Image (cartoon, rainbow, N blue to C red):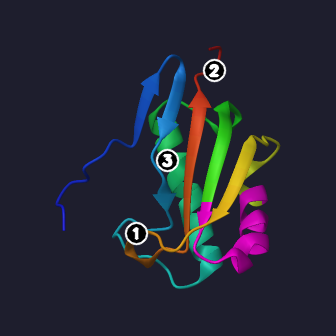
Amino acid sequence: MFDSKPYSDWVEHAGLIFFSGKTGAGPDGSIPIDFPAQASNAMSNVCTVLSGAGCEWRDVIKVTVFLADMSDYDSFNTTYAEHLGSAFPARSCVAVAGLPRGAAVEIEVVARRTGA
């Protein structure tokens, strides 16, 4: 296992900020078994990196959601709406065969700096 991650949380190019995917892992790296807790953690993790890049949800223009089980789609939508407020960026949601460390959800976003 890597002691440090071999990627950047985000990179900026031509006024756009591309964020690496975030799972529902907690601060200690553990992933809750409960899907709603994972989804909420993943959204919070995205908020953390957005803030670190000087962005907010209103700056996000595209979201890609990866679900290990599409039966979690409705549950994810509930959590997503609770965290997003009135900002509704374009979004794709795709089913995947697996995610890192057995996660059930991963979220990646593309944003622009306010005023860009």
Say whether disc 2 or disc 3 marks the residue closer to the N-terminus.
3
Q: Which mark is residue 100?
A: 1
Query: CA–CA distance between discs 3 and 1?
Result: 19 Å
Q: Is 47 situated left or right of 52 in this image?
A: right
Q: Residue at x 48, y 56 (%)?
A: 22
Q: Is residue 116 magenta?
A: no
Give how far across and how far down residue 68 sits, in percent: 58, 74
Asked if the residue at tag 1 contacts the one at tag 2, i.e. Cβ–Cβ closer than 8 Å, the answer is no
Say whether disc 3 or disc 1 marks the residue closer to the N-terminus.
3
Asked if the residue at tag 3 contacts the one at tag 2, i.e. Cβ–Cβ closer than 8 Å, the answer is no
Q: Mark 1 is on which residue type?
A: Pro
Q: Secondary structure at mark 2?
A: loop
**Who is closer to the viewer here, 66 or 57?**
66
Residue that carries the numbered disc 3 in the rendered image? 48
Q: Residue at x 75, y 40 (%)?
A: 89
Q: Mark 3 is on which residue type?
A: Thr
Quadrant in which the N terminus appears: bottom left
Q: Is residue 78 magenta?
A: yes
